[in-house]
Each structure stands twice: as structure tokens, then as C-alpha cells.
Image (cartoon, helix red, strand yellow):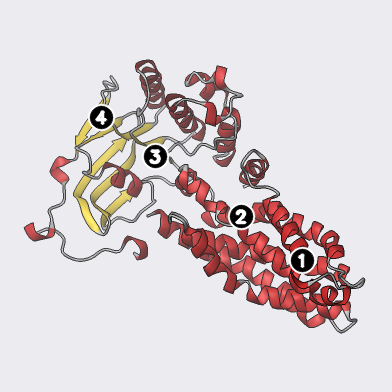
Amino acid sequence: MIALLLRDLRLAVRAGGGFGLGLAFFLIVVTLVPFGVGPEGDVLSRIATGVLWLGALLACLLSLDRIFALDFEDGSLDLLATAPVPLEGVVSIKALAHWITTGLPLVLAAPVFGVLLHLPGPAYFWLVVSLILGTPALSVLGAFGAALTVGLKRGGLLLSLLVLPLYVPTLIFGAELVKRGASGMDTQMPLLMLAGITAATIAVVPFASAAAIRVNLR
Amino acid sequence: MTLLAVENLTVTRGGLPVLEGLSFTLAAGHALVLRGPNGIGKTTLLRTLAGLQPALTGTISIPPESMAYAAHADGLKSTLSVTENLRFWASVYGTGPIDSALDRMNLRQLAERPAMSLSAGQKRRLGLARLLVTGRPVWVLDEPTVSLDAASVALFADAVRSHLAKGGAALMATHIDLGLHEAAVLDLAPFKALPPEEGGYKGSFDEAFS
């Protein structure tokens, strides 16, 4: 299992591995927003939370189809399915590798990019908290979408359509948490909901993803 | 000792049976070569045995955790080096050093090269070295000698021979003669499933949801 995680991380940072792609995309989205809505600080700071969360979501989406497609193409997925590791574990590890290479950099970069959008002071802390709690769910749900579409030619677009609706609860409670935290309101409810959604996702979805892969390999 | 026993097996591709009534056993120290024209269902049979797809009828008995499957594709990561690829599979299967596999498949000189710079035959040799590091007794091989030259085929035949001598077994689909005297040949043509209009299986079998 550890070997699989290390292999996936190593592949991500080697040439063509796509590490940093999501981060660069996130940066571009965030810098484009002031061009679109104008540079007024009060407008930007009001929409900053939503933009940052949406940007993180879309950046996450960008690298999802690589989770299983490459392993499917070169035959490793067949071999992993016959190897002495449970497919549920393979799915979870690959989602974890995706989070480390995509979600974690977004969490770390978001406060920096927040400056570009006049994010109000108290929101920085809650932005990082909400992204740390929310992005693992994005990777696990994304791995499920990738498992459903593995083996399909040009499955990437279908993958986005399948996965984005599943991201809605995470987005709602993630953005709500930052909004409440920034304005000094009670944050317990969105915090618990966000953490709960992520925990439930991690607990349940890998089984569905493994089942989808088994069906797709037949 | 019987390592693999197949009884009355019917395998399907695309919802239709391709081979039916197949029974054979494979004992330790023996190899079985599957023969048959293209499309007869060799790959389907091997994938079914490997557990990648369900069988319509019949039983497959094999001790747990004893099979290593090698498909048409070698499952190599092109940006990883030969050693990195092999080490990965060795740790997935929980086996130890990879040096003897490197030597056995004559990959020592290529050890630090990334897999993408290997030729087709060298990649195949790396794919076969992966089998050696699995440490599994039953090899299920789909066209193991594709893109290998005569010298590499001989290397592979030696590897199979020493695997058999150590109490392993091998089941392979191949069109060429490996020069393995201990290998029995199973011709699949007599087991070809009849089409529905000639009295074959008429139901519909959904591989995805069985």
C-alpha cells in the first residue's frame, strides 16, 4: 500500500505527471476574477470565499481522470486487481495520492491567493480549515467518478458531469464555514457538516469505486 | 499436487459463451500450453481464471494467493526506471530483493533506464521479470513471448523451467514452441461454444452484474 502511494507520488512529480497543474490553474482562475468583476476591494472581498472555493473545486477536477486512466491504459490496473491488495485499498490510496498532489497544495496556496481577492482578515484561518476538511472529500468522490469512467474514450468530460453535482454539499458547507467564520458567527454547524461529509465519503465511497472498477475491467 | 483445477467451465465474452465444458488440472511442476485460433477465447479464459471476469458455469479451484497473472500489457510505468518498476511490484507482493529477477531476464545493464526508453522486447522482458518477483507458484500468462527475439525466448523458457523445477506451475497461451518438453498442450478448438442458433446457450449473461 505504501509502495503504491510512493509510486503514485513519484509518477506525479516526474515529467508529464501533472503535479502543479491544478495549482497553476487555481492561480489563473483567481487572477482572472478581478479582471472580470473589476478591482474594487469591497466587491472582491465579498465574493472572495466563493471564488476561492470554486477555483479549488475546478482545479481538483482537472487531474481526476488521470487517477485510473493511465493505469488502465498500460495494464497496471488489471495487474493491481489480481495482486494481493484489496481494490478498495488501491482506490483509497490513489485518492490519497491525488489529494497530496492536488488538494494539499491548494490548501497551502489558498491563503496566498486570498490576498489577490482582498479576502477579509479573519477569513484566512477559516479558509484553510474549510479546505483541509473539504478537499479530501473532493479527491475521494473524484476517484469514484474516475472509477466509473475508466476505460471510456474521452471519459474526462463525462467524469466532470458526474462528479460536480457530488461536490455540491462540500462546496455549500465549505463556503458557509468561511463566511460565518469571517463575520464572527457561530461556525459549529458548517464545521461539523463539512467534517461529517468528508468522513462519510472516505468511509463509504471507496467501496463503490472498487465495485465500479471491477465492473469496468470485465 | 494439484495447484489449479478447472471443472466444466464456461467463459463468456460480450455476454456470449466462447468456450464451454472446459475441464483440466494443473499439477505442481507442470506447464500447460493453450492453443487455438485467434478469437477462440484464450485471453477470456485466462482473465476468468485470474478472477478479472466471472464464469458462466463451472468451478475454478486454486489455493488463495497463489496466482500471478501477466496480460498482454506489461503494466509498466514509462517514467519509472526498470528497478523502480520491479521494486514496486516486489513490495506489492511482499517479496524481497529483485536482483535475481534482473539477472534472470538479462536486465542488469538496463536497470537504471526509464521504462519508456526500452524497446518492445526489453519491456516484455521487464514484464516477465515482474512475474519472477511475485513469488507466486501458479503463473497464468497471456502470450508471454510476444516481441521477444530467439535469445529472449530461450531466457524465458529457462525461467519457466526453473520455476517448474521449484514446484511451480504455468498456464500459458502462446503460438510458438518454447521447447518445453514437460509442457502439455491443450487445444481449445473442441471446447468452442456453439452459436445460439445451433443449439448453444440462449440466455443473456451480463458480465457486469453477475
- The span from disc 2 to disc 3 (Cα, nearest Å) is 27 Å
Residue of label 3: B71
* Chain on which label 1 sits: A
Viewer-nearest of discs 4 and 1: 1
Mark 1 or 2, nearer chain start: 1
Q: Residues within 10 Å of mark 3 (few under 14, many from 20)?
A: many
- Compared to residue B32, the image places residue B209 above or below, namely below
User: Residue B104 placed where, x, y %?
Assistant: 48, 20
Whether labels 2 and 4 share one chain? no
User: Residue B194 placed where, x, y %?
Assistant: 12, 53
User: Residue B46 placed where, x, y %?
Assistant: 32, 43
Q: Which amino acid does label 1 sit on?
A: Phe
Q: Which amino acid does label 4 sit on?
A: His
Q: Do the residues labelled 4 and 1 touch (CB within 8 Å)?
A: no
* Chain on which label 3 sits: B
Whether labels 4 and 3 share one chain? yes
Q: Is residue B184 left or right of residue B160?
A: left
Residue of label 1: A35
Q: Residues within 10 Å of mark 1 (few under 14, many from 20)?
A: few
Q: Residues within 10 Å of mark 2 (few under 14, many from 20)?
A: many
- The span from disc 4 to disc 3 (Cα, nearest Å) is 15 Å
* Chain on which label 2 sits: A
Numbered tag placed on residue A52 in the rendering = none
Numbered tag placed on residue B175 in the rendering = 4
Q: Which residue is drawn at 39% across and 35% down?
A: B139
Residue nearer the viewer, B119 or B16: B119
Whether labels 3 and 1 share one chain? no
Residue A72 seen in render: yes
Q: Do the residues labelled 2 and 4 touch (CB within 8 Å)?
A: no
Q: What element carries label 4?
A: loop
- Compared to residue A27, the image places residue B163 above or below, namely above
Q: In this view, does A96 lie to the left or right of B108?
A: right
